[in-house]
Image: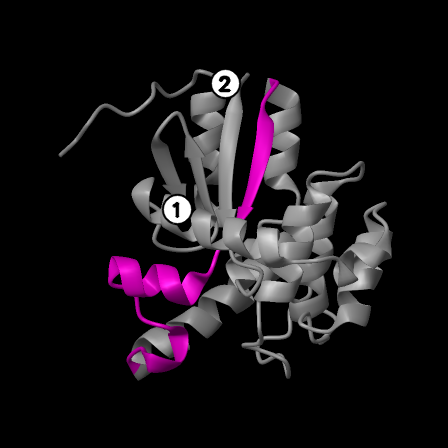
Amino acid sequence: MNIINYYFSVLSPFTYLAGDRLEALAEQNGYTVRYKPFDIMALFALTGGVPPKQRHKSRQRYRIEDLSRTSRLRRMPINLHPRFWPTDPVPASCSIINAAKQEGDTGLLVREVLTSCWARDEDISRMEVIGSCLAAAGFDPGLAQADQVVARDRFNQYTDSAAREGAFGSPTYVLNGEVFWGQDRLDHLEAVLVGRLSPAVDCL
C-alpha cells in the first residue's frame, strides 16, 4: 500500500494553512494518509527546536508576517493571536487517534480542529469543541469523552517516531523515508508523487 505518514500538531497555524491539499494529492495519486498527531513541544526538545514565544523578536515578527501572507494567498481566514493558544493539545490529538479507527473523514476532522483554533477562536482542549469537530467530520461526538489512555500512548509513540523519521516541525509529510517539512513543500511532495521529481538520495 502506498502510504504518506502525516506528522502534525493540532496547535500549528501552518498546518491549518495546508488546508485539504494533502488529502487531494493522496486521492489523485492513489496514496493513503496515516494521520499522526504529535507533541510539538516534546519534539522541539528532542530536535533542538525553540517554541515560538522563546524565539528572537525578529523571528517572531517574521512568523506573523509569513502567516498573514500565506493566509491571504490561500484565501483562508486566520486569527494571528488566538485567545486559546497555546492550549492542551492532548484531548484533541487523542480524539483524532481514536476517530481514525472509526468510519468518518479523518482529514476533515483534523481540519475542523485546526480551524476551530485558528479561525473560530475556540479552545480545542474543551470537550464540547472537540465533539462539534467530530460531528462535522461524520464521527460520534462521544469520542471526545472516550478513554484516552491507549490514545495517549499512541500520541507519545507518534512523537518519538516523528523524531526518528526526521521530523522537527509541523506539518511534516514522510514518503518512503523522504521528509517534506511545511505546507509550502506540498509542491515538492506532489512532484515526487507524480514522477516529475525523482526521490531523494541520501545526501548526508
Around disc 1, counting alpha carbons within 10 Å, would you say few (fewer than 14), some (14 to 19), or many (20 or more)? many
* The stretch drawn in magenta includes residue 52: yes
Quadrant position of the C terminus in the picture: top left
Residue 122 in percent (x, y) is at: 73, 75
Residue type beneath disc 2: Val
Q: Is residue 138 left or right of residue 155?
A: right
| x 53%, y 19%: residue | 2
* The stretch drawn in magenta includes residue 131: no
Q: Is residue 114 above or below residue 7?
A: below
Element marked by disc 2: loop
Q: Is residue 161 above or below residue 53?
A: above
Give 107 or 163, whichever is nearer the viewer: 163
Residue 93 in percent (x, y) is at: 61, 57
* Badge nearest the viewer, 1 or 2: 1
Residue 127 in percent (x, y) is at: 76, 70
Residue assigned mark 2: 194
Residue assigned mark 1: 162
In magenta, the rendered stretch is 30-56
Give 147 or 157, whichever is nearer the viewer: 147
Q: Is residue 68 left or right of residue 133?
A: left
Can residue 96 be seen here? The reply is yes
Quadrant position of the N terminus in the picture: top right
Residue type beneath disc 1: Ala
Q: Is residue 131 above or below residue 63?
A: above
Q: Is residue 37 left or right of residue 201?
A: right
